Amino acid sequence: MRQIFLDTETTGLSADQGDRVVEIGCVELFNRKLTGNNLHIYLNPGRDSHEEALKVHGLTTEFLRDKPKFEQIADEFLAFVQDAEIIIHNAAFDVGFLNVELKRAGKLPFKEHVASVVDTLAMAKEIFPGKRNSLDALCSRLEVDNSGRTLHGALLDAELLADVYINMTRGQDALLMDSGEQQEEGGSAVEGMDLSGFDLTVLLANQQELAAHTDAIQQINKASGGKAIWQETA
């Protein structure tokens, strides 16, 4: 599967009020491995960045003055992301800005060009309910080195997001076990294992373990504001 981790930097927080994209960073993964086929573009937004935005990304009007306009790179950008699964942290923000830029360039909305969009912020909120789930917080929690992130940069943030995503989803491939006769792994056939003949011992939890489990469930339910999935399916 081809996946693109995408991040943007902008002149401010509101595309509807005229703020523009100033940087796009895309990092490609194929079958969960970095390919090195990345896309990194600085853009001339035709306006100054707000002071708070400038503190975040440090991209001055002077630096961006000789960079291309979005409409000049729109086709290159769309060709790169075409039909890929796009993974973004807080996707609504970036997609909203990209949609405005694409409309200005006479192009269809972003989701019309890609296979799907995955929001890692929404994923993180499900996995870590009640905790801070900014990219920095996830890097710290998942032991992803972000020591070089003194300023936000679209390509650096996309690279960090790729590491965060791989850590958040680690082990999922192992759950996709094929009970059939064979499966392909690394181009060679692997025999499936028949477990039906094994007599597995069942170890029951003791009272102390049951009490600890109940307490953990209550803490998770409290942190999620009573929206734990087992409450909905009970």
Image (spheres, rainbow, N blue to C red):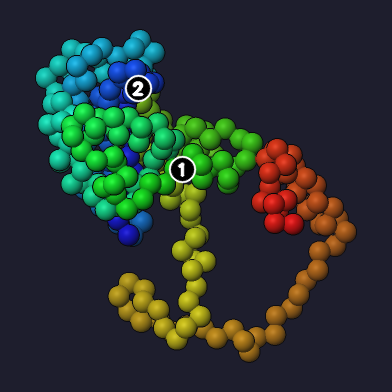
**Does any portion of residue 148 appear in the rendered image?**
no
Q: Secondary structure at mark 1?
A: helix
Question: Where's the N terminus, which quadrant?
Answer: bottom left
Cβ–Cβ under 8 Å for marks 2 and 1:
no
Left or right of 78 on screen, residue 88: right
Toward which corner of the image does residue 152 lie, by quadrant? top left
> Dot 2 lies on which element?
loop
Identify the residue shown where x is 70% and y is 38%: 225
Q: Position of residue 18 (x, y in %)?
A: 30, 18
Choose between 153 and 123: the one closer to the eye.
Answer: 123
Q: Residue at x 59, y 42 (%)?
A: 128
Q: Is residue 147 above or below residue 124?
A: above
Q: Mark 2, residues whose alpha carbon is within 10 Å: few (<14), some, or many (≥20)?
A: few
Q: Residue furthest bottom?
A: 197
Q: Earlier in the sequence, mark 2 or mark 1?
A: 2
In the picture of the structure, the residue carrying the numbered disc 1 is 120
Location of residue 211 in the rendering, given as x and y in whole percent from the top left corner: 84, 52
Q: Label 2 to label 1, Cα distance in Å?
A: 24 Å
Q: How many marks?
A: 2
Mark yes or no: residue 99 visible: yes
Q: Is residue 143 left or right of residue 32?
A: right
Q: Is residue 222 left or right of residue 114?
A: right
* Eye-nearest disc, 2 or 1: 2
What's the amino acid at mark 2?
Asp
Residue at left offset 51%, top offset 42%: 122
Is 103 displayed left or right of 171 in the figure? left
Disc 2 marks which residue?
Answer: 16
> What is the three-letter code of the residue carrying label 1?
Thr
- Could you tell me residue 137's position as x and y percent? 52, 33
Identify whether 24 is placed above or below 52. below
Q: Which of the 4 quarters of the picture holds residue 154?
A: top left
